[in-house]
Image (tube, rainbow, N blue to C red):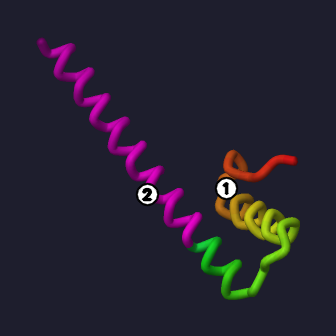
């Protein structure tokens, strides 16, 4: 019984971390988009460059657009 409770506690903590990461990613996307719009960046290559710079600066290279 104690093993089951410990495992469920671990799962709950993992789900909490996943939820925070999803929220943080959404906030990063919104901030990048707002900055891009504020700067008037509309050319596709410039949009990709801007996006990738933001993701790199945030330490989220896993989200960068690869060509």
Decide if residue 41 is on the left or right side of residue 58.
right
Spot occupied by residue 28 in the image (x, y as percentages of width and height):
57, 65
Q: Earlier in the sequence, mark 2 or mark 1?
A: 2
Work out whether residue 19 or residue 39 is closer to the camera in this orientation and state it. Answer: 39
Tell me what residue is drawn at x 73 percent, y 65 percent: 51
Tell me what residue is drawn at x 66 percent, y 80 percent: 35
Q: Of helix, strand and loop, which one carries label 1?
A: loop
Tell me what residue is drawn at x 77 percent, y 61 percent: 52
Q: Which residue is mark 1?
A: 59
Spot occupied by residue 49 in the image (x, y as percentages of width and height):
83, 66
Decide if residue 16 is on the left or right side of residue 29.
left
As measured in the structure, the alpha-carbon distance from the residue carrying label 2 to the one carrying label 1 is 15 Å
Q: Callout 2: few (<14), some (14-19), or many (20+) C-alpha neighbours within 10 Å?
A: few
Quadrant containing the N terminus is top left
Q: Which residue is mark 2?
A: 23
Check residue 26 for magenta coloring.
yes
Decide if residue 48 is on the left or right side of residue 54.
right
Tell me what residue is drawn at x 64 percent, y 71 percent: 32
The answer to which quarter of the image holds residue 43 is bottom right
Check residue 5 for magenta coloring.
yes
Q: Which residues are magenta?
A: 1-30
Q: Main secondary structure of the magenta part?
A: helix
Is the residue 36 above or below the residue 13 in the image? below
Spot occupied by residue 9 in the image (x, y as percentages of width and height):
24, 30
Question: Which disc, if any, is residue 32?
Answer: none
């Amino acid at each position: 019984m104690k093993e089951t409770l410990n495992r469920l506690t671990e799962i709950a903590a993992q789900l909490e971390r996943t939820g925070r990461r999803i929220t943080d990613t959404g906030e990063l996307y919104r901030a990048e988009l707002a900055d891009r719009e504020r700067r008037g960046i509309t050319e596709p290559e410039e949009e990709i460059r801007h996006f990738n710079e933001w993701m790199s600066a945030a330490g989220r290279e896993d989200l960068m657009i690869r060509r």
